[in-house]
Amino acid sequence: MARSLCPKCREGAVFSSFLKMNKTCPVCGTQFEREHGYFLMAIFIGYLLNAFVFAPFVLYFYFNDRLGQAVIPLMIAIIICIPITFRYSRMVWLYLDQALDPRQ
Ligand SMILES: [Zn+2]
């Protein structure tokens, strides 16, 4: 998953560039987007990833009464992390979906 390989064969690259996904696996031909709107669940996973990464910082600044000063830097950090979140939330969703409903 961390290397962004196909969840079925674990050899083909899911992404052709940093943010551009292949439609199918170049090795086994698996179609990554099973249906229209397939990656909507990846948005939810992206929220969870961001919460997992940034919640400790928010809590730290909150309990030190500095949350007002930290809002802008935290927003900038979250915006900088959007491409990474995009990529890995899709990978988490692809692997989770493959585990729950394996492709034939
Ligand atoms: Zn494959």
Image (spheres, grey):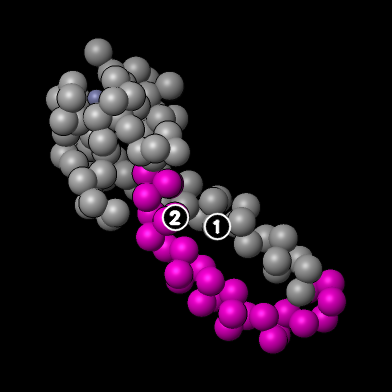
Mark 1 highlights which residue? 50
Please say if 54 is above or below 63: above
Badge 2 marks a residue whose secondary structure is helix
Q: Residue 63: say if magenta.
A: yes
Identify the image quadrant of residue 14: top left
Q: Position of residue 39 (x, y in %)?
A: 32, 44
Tell me which residue sits at (59%, 80%) in the image: 73
Quadrant in which residue 41 is drawn: top left
Q: Is residue 25 magenta?
A: no
- Farthest residue to the bottom: give it: 69
Q: Is residue 24 left or right of residue 77?
A: left
Q: Quadrant of the C terminus?
A: top left
Q: Residue 13 got which mark? A: none
Picture quarter with ligand 1: top left
Residue 60: x percent and y percent?
78, 68
Quick one: SS at disc 1? helix
Amino acid of disc 2: Thr
**From the viewer's perspective, is 76 left or right of 90?**
right
- Stretch of the chain drawn in magenta: 62-90
Q: Amino acid at mark 1?
A: Asn
Label whose residue precedes the other's in the sequence (1 or 2) = 1
State which quadrant residue 22 falls in.
Answer: top left
Residue ID for mark 2: 85
Tell me which secondary structure the magenta stretch mostly adopts: helix
Q: Is residue 53 above or below residue 93?
A: below
Please say whether residue 54 is visible from this viewpoint.
Answer: yes
